């Protein structure tokens, strides 16, 4: 730190102690802060749109489990970042966002009430002064980590270059204790589990955060249960009895088994629409126990809710239940074996001559290196890769935008994931609509991703709207997109790439991989609009049935 540090220097000094990277876009409000960190050599990744800075930091945490810092200026820079900030808030991603703010003397004509805006998103703002800059920066990191949320650290414009005074002492805080389960509750749950004949344990990201994976497998082995996971917790359980992703991204065989369970223990999963396959994942008469630290159950199918730390509760429950000899998994082994068989290869082309996205996903799974970080943007296309492509661990597959139902964050998110895990190839999965929305940060991806493949499922449309609204008779003019060749755009920016219209066009990708897979390869896949993802078809079935009946 300089001999007479300013407020921005103090904030930067604390940030440098807690993070190894800064994602940013410089403006008037954060120039002093950013300069301090770049001058000292902290790795700095510049986005080309402010939303990209937050999306990068969000994905960096999801891929590495380490908190990153994003920074934008005040006003328009702040508002440009709001969609990515809301996604981080709803996905419960801990990041620290350092922003410029109106001066303490009062707002200027171009200032807005950023505190009020952030509050509306459910995001806390800490505004520093000359005396508390160090303390509040420490508190921002502590709050982000402890509460699993984004925190805004705001620097008023007139204080950014103001000499900092003596700093207030940092507040002393103790780590929050784990929420211990009630013994009587555990006893009642144990009785329910002991009566079950077909128990299923569904593990979510909360189980991973709690470190409950081993305890979950031990409980399942004791009662002869089968397992499933949310998409965010994929491959978190080391067991041959894992049926894979639950809900909308499940394949047919595993899905039949999940739906036949008479008891489901849900550990740290939110039971959102995708996980529950729009309410159809569980049998109508199934007992559904949800374990989480949220205040209440998150789905109407839950019959018993237990608020407790996942690892503590599962360990206590394992001790309370009686062991069974084999259980469900061995009573019908041929059924389980059949359910775990992969789906048959799909046809290459649809009736319109464009590629079937299912066969593309199947081919990519066998072609791309196993050590991969898959980053998915939001959109109809997000159903293909989770169904047909493997990920090495929960951090190897992230769904960006699904928490806020947004599109267009995938490209910068891939940058953050690549910076977090340069040892893995980064595989970005995007649709043409979202890719166009985030096109500014394609340059960032070319510049910052050392080894990555950008796959664009290009159906020349907003696919989700086609399958949800054109299918109901709405005019599709606004749903169509003139076809764009993203591989040509990528090559113009320095990437490799090819427009893929048949499986034979994968040869260029194979050659690039064999040559060392350096840089970014853009694979623009011309897919059909006619193939509907399973999760989308299931969500639309009641509506289309009602229309048909009417």
Image (tube, rainbow, N blue to C red):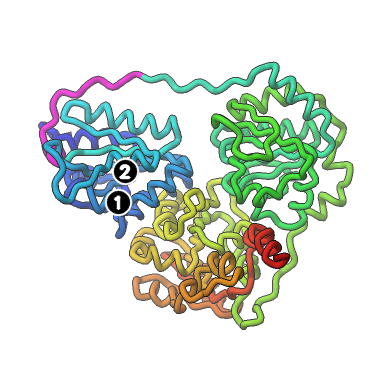
- Residue 106 percent location from the top left of the image: 14, 39
Q: Is residue 71 left or right of residue 483?
A: left
Image quadrant for the N terminus? top left
Q: Position of residue 15 (x, y in %)?
A: 29, 37
Label 1, on which residue? Answer: 79
Question: Dominant secondary structure of the magenta stretch?
Answer: loop
Image height of 538 relative to 325, above or below: below
Tag 1 near tag 2, CB within 8 Å: yes
For the residue pair 363 and 99, the one nearer the viewer reads as 99
- 133 is higher (above) or lower (below) than 393: above
Element under label 2? Answer: helix
Q: Is residue 520 left or right of residue 252?
A: left
Residue under the image location 42 percent in, 37 percent down: 149
One can see residue 388 in this view = no
Which residue is more in the foreground, 213 or 58? 58
Q: Position of residue 23 (x, y in %)?
A: 32, 49
Along the line of sight, which residue is nearer the eye, 403 or 360? 403
Which image quadrant is residue 520 in? bottom left
Mark number for residue 448?
none
**Residues in magenta?**
157-172
Q: Looking at the rendering, in which quadrant would you find the C terminus?
A: bottom right
The image quadrant that residue 204 belongs to is: top right
Q: Which residue is mark 2?
A: 117
């Amino acid at each position: 730190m300089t001999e007479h540090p300013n407020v921005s220097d103090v904030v930067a000094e604390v940030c440098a102690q807690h993070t190894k990277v800064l994602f940013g876009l410089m403006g008037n409000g954060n120039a002093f802060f950013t300069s301090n960190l770049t001058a000292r050599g902290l790795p700095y990744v510049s986005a080309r749109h402010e939303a990209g800075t937050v999306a990068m930091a969000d994905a960096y945490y999801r891929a590495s489990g380490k908190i990153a810092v994003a920074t934008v200026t005040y006003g328009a820079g702040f508002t440009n970042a709001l969609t990515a900030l809301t996604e981080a808030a709803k996905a419960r991603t801990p990041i620290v966002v350092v922003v410029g703010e109106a001066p303490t003397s009062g707002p200027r004509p171009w200032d807005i009430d950023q505190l009020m805006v952030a509050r509306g998103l459910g995001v806390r703002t800490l505004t520093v002064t000359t005396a508390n800059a160090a303390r509040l920066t420490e508190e921002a990191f502590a709050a982000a980590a402890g509460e699993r949320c984004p925190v805004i650290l705001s620097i008023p414009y007139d204080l950014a270059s103001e000499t900092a005074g003596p700093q207030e002492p940092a507040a002393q805080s103790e780590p929050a204790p784990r929420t211990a389960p009630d013994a009587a509750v555990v006893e009642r749950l144990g009785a329910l589990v002991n009566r079950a004949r077909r128990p299923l344990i569904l593990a979510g990201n909360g189980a991973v955060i709690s470190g409950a994976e081993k305890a979950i497998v031990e409980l399942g082995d004791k009662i002869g249960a089968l397992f499933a996971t949310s998409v965010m917790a994929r491959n978190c359980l080391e067991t041959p009895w894992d049926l894979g992703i639950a809900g909308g991204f499940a394949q047919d065989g595993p899905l039949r088994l999940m739906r036949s369970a008479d008891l489901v223990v849900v550990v740290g999963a939110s039971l959102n629409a995708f996980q529950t396959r729009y309410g159809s994942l569980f049998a109508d008469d199934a007992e559904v126990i949800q374990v989480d630290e949220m205040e209440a159950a998150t789905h109407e199918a839950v019959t018993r809710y237990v608020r407790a730390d996942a690892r503590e509760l599962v360990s206590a429950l394992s001790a309370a239940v009686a062991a069974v000899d084999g259980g469900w998994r061995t009573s019908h082994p041929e059924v389980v074996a059949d359910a775990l068989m992969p789906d048959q290869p799909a046809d290459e082309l649809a009736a319109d001559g464009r590629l079937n996205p299912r066969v593309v996903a199947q081919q990519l799974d066998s072609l791309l290196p196993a050590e991969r970080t898959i980053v998915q943007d939001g959109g109809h296309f997000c159903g293909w890769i989770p169904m047909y492509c493997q990920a090495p661990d929960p951090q190897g597959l992230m769904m960006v935008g699904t928490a806020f139902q947004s599109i267009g964050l995938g490209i910068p998110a891939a940058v953050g994931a690549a910076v977090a895990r340069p040892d893995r190839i980064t595989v970005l999965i995007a649709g043409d609509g979202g890719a166009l929305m985030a096109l500014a940060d394609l340059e960032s991806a070319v510049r910052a991703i050392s080894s990555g493949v950008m796959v664009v499922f290009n159906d020349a449309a907003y696919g989700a709207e086609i399958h949800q609204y054109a299918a109901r008779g709405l005019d599709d003019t606004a749903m169509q997109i003139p076809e764009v060749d993203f591989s040509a755009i990528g090559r113009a920016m320095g990437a490799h790439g090819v427009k893929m219209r048949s499986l034979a066009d994968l040869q260029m990708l194979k050659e690039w991989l064999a040559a060392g897979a350096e840089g970014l390869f853009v694979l623009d896949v011309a897919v059909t609009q006619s193939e509907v993802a399973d999760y989308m078809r299931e969500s639309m079935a009641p509506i289309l049935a009602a229309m048909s009946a009417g």
